[in-house]
Image (spheres, grey):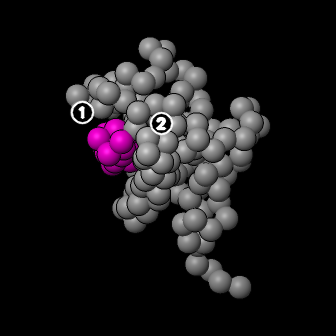
Amino acid sequence: MSTQPPRYGSQDASYQAAGGIEGIRRLVDDFYRIMDTWEPARTIRDMHAEELTLARDKLACFLSGWLGGPKLFQERYGQISIPMFHRTWPIGDAERDAWLGCMAQAIELQPYAPAFKEYLLRQLRVPAERIVAVQRKVEA
């Protein structure tokens, strides 16, 4: 039996590295605070409701399951296809970059291990790219 911890992306290693649901909620709170105040994010902030309580909960619940923890989004809101959910908004490269910029800043504020910070941002690029790809297909 190995004494090394599981690698990120395996079982609940990423969820644990993020601090469980409490750590994920801190990340999400910082993410939306940055989105509220960082000028390059104005366009994506305007895609959200003025009140962010529901958006915060949905993102935290999604990230919980996505990182290998409890599938809170499915329990509370049902199944979701991230690219299909976002196809109603005009999301291109600028919006993707703004979202990832907010997330990069929020991740940097967390007490995560440097390797996990890098891993998490790299993994978040995958769905962000898929959203843009679906949007391009809709526009074509």
x%, y% of residue 125? 42, 55
* Crowding at mark 2 (Cα within 10 Å: few <14, some 14-19, many 20+): many
Name the residue: 59% across, 30% down: 57
x%, y% of residue 89? 46, 31
Nearer to us of marks 2 and 1 is 1
In the depicted view, which residue is nearer to us: 82 or 103?
Answer: 82
> Residue beneath label 1, please?
40
Three-letter amino acid code at the position of disc 1: Pro
> Residue beneath label 2, please?
28
Q: Image quadrant for the C terminus?
A: top left
What is the magenta range?
Answer: 92-109
With respect to residue 138, does 76 lie above or below?
above
Dominant SS in magenta? helix
Asked where in the image residue 3 lies, by quadrant, the reply is: bottom right
Which of the numbered marks, if any, corresponds to residue 20?
none
x%, y% of residue 72? 70, 40
Name the residue: 71% across, 85% down: 1
Distance from label 2 to label 1 (Cα)? 18 Å
x%, y% of residue 52? 49, 21
In this view, which residue lies farthest toward the left? 39
Going from the N terminus, do you reach mark 2 or mark 1 first? 2
